[in-house]
Image: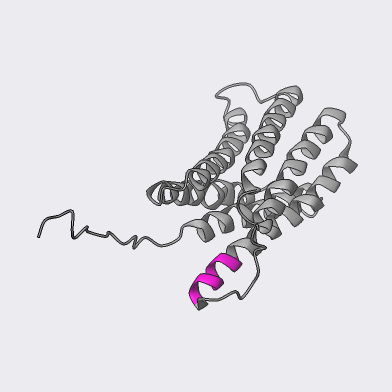
């Protein structure tokens, strides 16, 4: 017998990194947008979550998506992981006097480019499931609302964006829970809305 008659099948034994990435994104997004909604000030709790769970945990999830040959998951998780780290850096670099604090027009450009990036990724979700479509659609809206709020200096828009962001983060937490429980129980516990 030769190798061509008996191919070796290698089974993927890696855990699914999607719930980790989605929880990292979702929980941090909810907490930041509780601030945007006016429930509490920007504080170390939000920044620590942004740096470690929203940032580093998503990057780790993205690296494991790479190992699973999931280009979309890798791109999304690593990008949004570094979004959170860059957001924390934007806040601290100015406070520490390393460089001047980002101006309002600069923050509008920052939020707008992330909104455009998210919109482009949204089109990729049209091949995935309705839960992820909702996450990316609401995230696109969130970035643009925050950019408009900064551009107009209208706190009502920022507060509204905060509520919309809570919905976005909550939907990511739902998707994370659905992926985790559906895989764990081997059946649909929470529907993700498969694309037909």
* Helix, strand or loop for the magenta stretch, by majority: helix
Residue 183 covered by magenta stretch: yes
Residue 41 seen in the current view:
no
Q: Residue at x 82, y 28 (%)?
A: 151
**Rendered location of residue 129, percent (x, y):** 64, 56
Q: Residue at x 72, y 30 (%)?
A: 112
Residue 159 seen in the current view:
yes
Q: Which residues are magenta?
A: 177-184
Using the image as rendered, state which of residue 182 and residue 50 is in the foreground: 182
Using the image as rendered, state which of residue 192 and residue 18 is in the foreground: 192
**Rendered location of residue 193, percent (x, y):** 67, 63
Task: Tell me the quarter of the picture where residue 97 sits.
Answer: top right
- From the viewer's perspective, is residue 165 above or below residue 92? below
Task: Tell me the quarter of the picture where residue 188 sits.
Answer: bottom right
Lateral position of residue 74 relative to residue 149, left or right: left
Quadrant where the N terminus sits is bottom left
**Rendered location of residue 184, percent (x, y):** 49, 74
Using the image as rendered, state which of residue 77 and residue 147 is in the foreground: 77
Lateral position of residue 132 relative to residue 74, left or right: right
**Rendered location of residue 115, percent (x, y):** 70, 35
Quadrant where the C terminus sits is bottom right
Lateral position of residue 3 relative to residue 115, left or right: left
């Amino acid at each position: 017998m030769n190798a061509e008659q008996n191919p070796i099948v290698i089974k993927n034994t890696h855990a699914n990194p999607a719930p980790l990435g989605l929880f990292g994104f979702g929980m941090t997004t909810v907490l930041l947008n509780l601030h945007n909604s006016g429930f509490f000030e920007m504080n170390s709790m939000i920044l620590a979550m942004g740096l470690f769970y929203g940032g580093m945990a998503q990057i780790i999830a993205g690296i494991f998506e790479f190992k699973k040959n999931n280009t979309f998951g890798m791109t999304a998780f690593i990008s949004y992981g570094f979004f959170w780290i860059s957001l924390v850096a934007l806040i601290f670099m100015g406070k520490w006097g390393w460089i001047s604090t980002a101006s309002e027009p600069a923050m509008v450009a920052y939020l707008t480019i992330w909104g455009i990036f998210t919109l482009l990724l949204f089109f990729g979700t049209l091949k995935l499931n309705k839960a992820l479509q909702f996450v990316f659609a609401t995230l696109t809206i969130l970035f643009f609302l925050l950019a408009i709020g900064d551009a107009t200096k209208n706190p009502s828009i920022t507060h509204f964006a905060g509520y919309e962001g809570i919905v976005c983060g909550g939907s990511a937490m739902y998707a994370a829970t659905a992926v985790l429980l559906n895989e764990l129980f081997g059946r649909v516990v929470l529907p993700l809305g498969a694309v037909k």
